[in-house]
Amino acid sequence: MNSTTLQRSRTLFGVFFYLSAVTLGGGLAMLPLMRQEFVEKRKWMTDDEMVDTVAAMQSMPGIIAMNMGVLIGYRCAGIPGAIAAIFGGLLPPFIAIVLLATLVAQLRQYAFVQHLFLGVRAAVAAMILLAVVSLGKQILKGERPRCIFAWTVAIASFAALVFFGVDAILVIVVGAILGLICHFVLP
């Protein structure tokens, strides 16, 4: 590895560590700072290369920030740069999760913390229920026979999962078969 690659890899690690530590909202929130860092400040990339990198990143599955780390790191310093950018981006959330988990484990013995988590779980359950109802209203609509059929399948699926412990994959397969039957039978 030559000195330029080594220096760029160190810089990529530092930049991605910093961006990961201070930006909220994931990879897309990092884009303006990445452009400023790699196009304007360091001139390692052109605007066109940055646009191409973002386009390629959006077509890839996975975490946006890590995809950008791989693509920008590789473009700027090859495989060592990609590895440095990934580790730089992964380290701050990893450290934060370890610290929070340690803190929660230490505080979990106190009754007020247990009650706090009970309240948080209840609030999260309410938010999930609200999302399910909102999505259900949008998804489960249509002409009367199809709408009644869709709601019946949704309620039966819920009951099968929650009350009878039926495997989720089986529920999905049966739902797909029922949907096909509905398509060919109901008006």
Image (cartoon, rainbow, N blue to C red):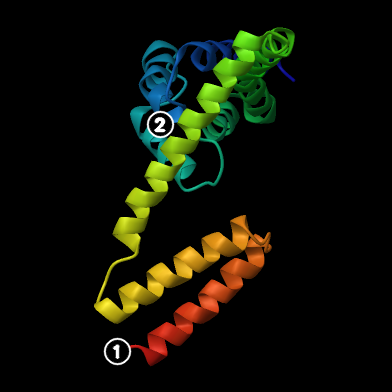
- Choose top left, top right, bottom left or bottom right for residue 10: top right
| Gap between marks 2 and 1 measured at Cα | 51 Å
Residue 53 in view: no
Residue 50: image tag: 2
Q: Give amino acid for label 2.
A: Met
Disc 1 crowd, CA 10 A, few/some/many (<14, 14-19, 20+): few
Residue found 31% across the figure and 81% down from its top: 145
x and y percentages locating residue 118 in the rendered image = 57, 24
Q: Is residue 182 above or below residue 30?
A: below
Residue found 64% across the figure and 24% down from its top: 81
Residue found 38% across the figure and 22% down from its top: 35
Residue 172 in view: yes
x and y percentages locating residue 169 in the rendered image = 65, 65
Q: Is 116 on the left or on the right of 94, as rendered?
A: left
Dots 2, 1 in contact, CB < 8 A: no
Report how many numbered discs are placed on residues in the image: 2
Mark 1 — residue?
Answer: 187
* Residue at the extreme left of the image, as rendered: 143
Residue found 38% across the figure and 43% down from its top: 130
Q: Is residue 182 above or below residue 11?
A: below
Q: Give amino acid for label 1.
A: Pro
Task: Describe the element under mark 2 as helix, strand or loop.
Answer: helix
